[in-house]
Image: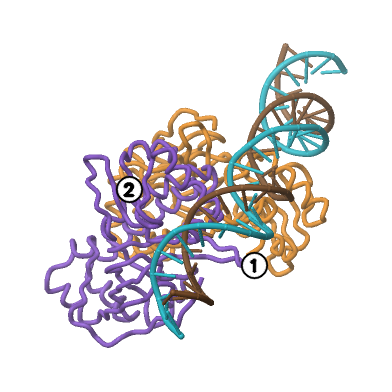
Chain colours: A orange, B purple, C brown, D cyan
Amino acid sequence: MTAGTPFELPAKCDTCVVRHKSICAVLSEDELKDFNRIARHRRVPTGQVIAADSEIVFANILDGVVKLTKTLADGRQQIVGLQFPPDFLGRIYAKESPYFAEAATDVELCAFPKDGFEGMLRRYPGLEHRLFENTLDELDSAREWMLLLGRKTARERVASLLMMIARRAPNVGCSHTPDNNFAKFTLPLTRADLADYLGLTLETVSRQITNLKKADIIELIDNREIIVPNLDALEDVAGN
Amino acid sequence: MTAGTPFELPAKCDTCVVRHKSICAVLSEDELKDFNRIARHRRVPTGQVIAADSEIVFANILDGVVKLTKTLADGRQQIVGLQFPPDFLGRIYAKESPYFAEAATDVELCAFPKDGFEGMLRRYPGLEHRLFENTLDELDSAREWMLLLGRKTARERVASLLMMIARRAPNVGCSHTPDNNFAKFTLPLTRADLADYLGLTLETVSRQITNLKKADIIELIDNREIIVPNLDALEDVAGN
DNA sequence: TGTAATCATTGACTTGCATCAAATGCACTG
DNA sequence: CAGTGCATTTGATGCAAGTCAATGATTACA
């Protein structure tokens, strides 16, 4: 974890838009413009911490991948969530986030100051409802991951992760025609990050990726570029 | 997992009240009575499944402990949540829950039919907000548990669980004066359930409990009754 | 009061993943 | 294009937790 300087509000950026599907669905064009008045566009380089400081509660991810991590006193670390565009970021209704948010890749954000965003929530009924539904989905995902961390083997974990990326990463450079069972994507994480997400060591992750390659379940173009010729085969390995 | 017959709506029970602290805080006496009109009181014996059928979306736990479980095809099981009074139960805004709810002990519920409860949500602004905050707390807890499942040792896991019970179980027969660092409580789970919650086997759980006993961190009155003479000492073992 | 059933503990052995240590590959730089 | 640094792979070994099996302890009940 290479923590850079904390994230700070940049100058106003008129081109910044809230892109979250749920939000866009419940807001009119004019209301979105209202959001843009308080939105601040921001680039965050790989590895930099996205601060949970008091000025920013909430941010919409425009591009890149953000990891949420928790760490024990002796340094053992666990990634407890991965956020892709157009997910939201930030623990609303709390002063501090109980976890770290860190850019796993170069990230572009549309950030909102605390007071402004909570004002928006009051102004637009239905908006909080959408955020609530997002949170319920995140809770379901977290519990899905608890099953993985508690009960799956290393091989199943790696396969499950690849399936998850293949499903969620189309916004981060995944060319993937869902119908034909084929996927090609760029891993947004290093082996060390994969390990922290899967509750394994990076060596074990590496070995399992090698095994999947030898079993012709996946192909590697390079360390990060992966082809899954048959998603069903990968799904089988993933368990469930 | 001994699945009994699915849970069904009983006859109306006038003595049933919503007891959730968050709900009570935002509703008046009259509004609570409104809730009671559609509430149905229900007892569920240990081991019985609390069905996620279409008629019941939501239930307030009055007494007992409910476990939420997910299972792999080959039977490996993980408890992904434990609900104590006065928690709510049920995946709102979804037809089906992505996990099983099962009574870990004898349980008393105050249950609501789907349509009625969602009507209430619309009628009482502020209520959904409270449920949202509850869900955010549940998400934080789930992520805390991901750290445990991914990175903690068996000994740390068992100690963490006992700490969690000592904190949350005062409503289920835990005599516990938080100031004096002492706790006494009844485990609401069998060794097998503890194992399913901790991502371990029941033998490992049993051995770790024995170890904590030998190290004078805990005392056992019987298999279920536990005394923690010094919560700080237990906290140390739990890690973090 | 004996028998079964359930739940928990304990012991012996096995194994999957972690740990430790090196080697390889690749991008960048002087 | 040698040299440095980082990410990844590969190999050898150890250990924490799993598996298998037997024994205790309680409670239920015939």
Left or right for A93, reference D20: left
Residue sitting at x 31%, y 63%: B87
| SS class, disc 2 | strand
Image spot of residue A23 (x, y percent): 41, 60
Above or below — where is B59 with respect to A4? below
Contact flag, marks 1 and 2 (Cβ < 8 Å): no
Sequence-first tag of 1 and 2: 1
- In the picture, the quarter occupied by the N terminus of chain A is top right
Which residue appears farthest toward the bottom when viewing the image? Answer: B11
Q: Report whether B79 appears left or right of A216.
A: left
Is B110 located above or below residue B158 in the figure? below
Q: Give the residue at mark 1.
A: B74
Identify the residue at horizontal 43%, vertical 45% (top origin).
Answer: B159
Please state which of residues A224 and B206 is positioned toward the viewer in this rendering: B206
Query: To which quarter of the image does residue B59 belong?
Result: bottom left
* Front-lying residue, C11 or B215: C11
The spot of residue B146 in percent (x, y) is: 49, 49
* Amino acid type of the residue that numbered disc 1 sits on in the rendered structure: Asp
Labels 1 and 2 share a subunit: yes
> Relative to residue B108, is residue A36 drawn left or right?
right
Residue A141 seen in this snapshot = no
Residue depicted at x 27% and y 88%? B11
Instruction: Say whether residue B238 is visible.
Output: yes
Q: Amino acid at mark 2?
A: Ile
Q: Disc 1: which chain?
A: B
From the image, tell me which residue sits under label 2.
B227
Residue B208 disc label = none
Residue visible at 70% across and 70% down in the picture: A179
- Are there few (<14), some (14-19), or many (20+) residues within 10 Å of tag 2? many
Q: Position of residue A150 (x, y in %)?
A: 56, 54
The vertical placement of D20 against A68, above or below, is below
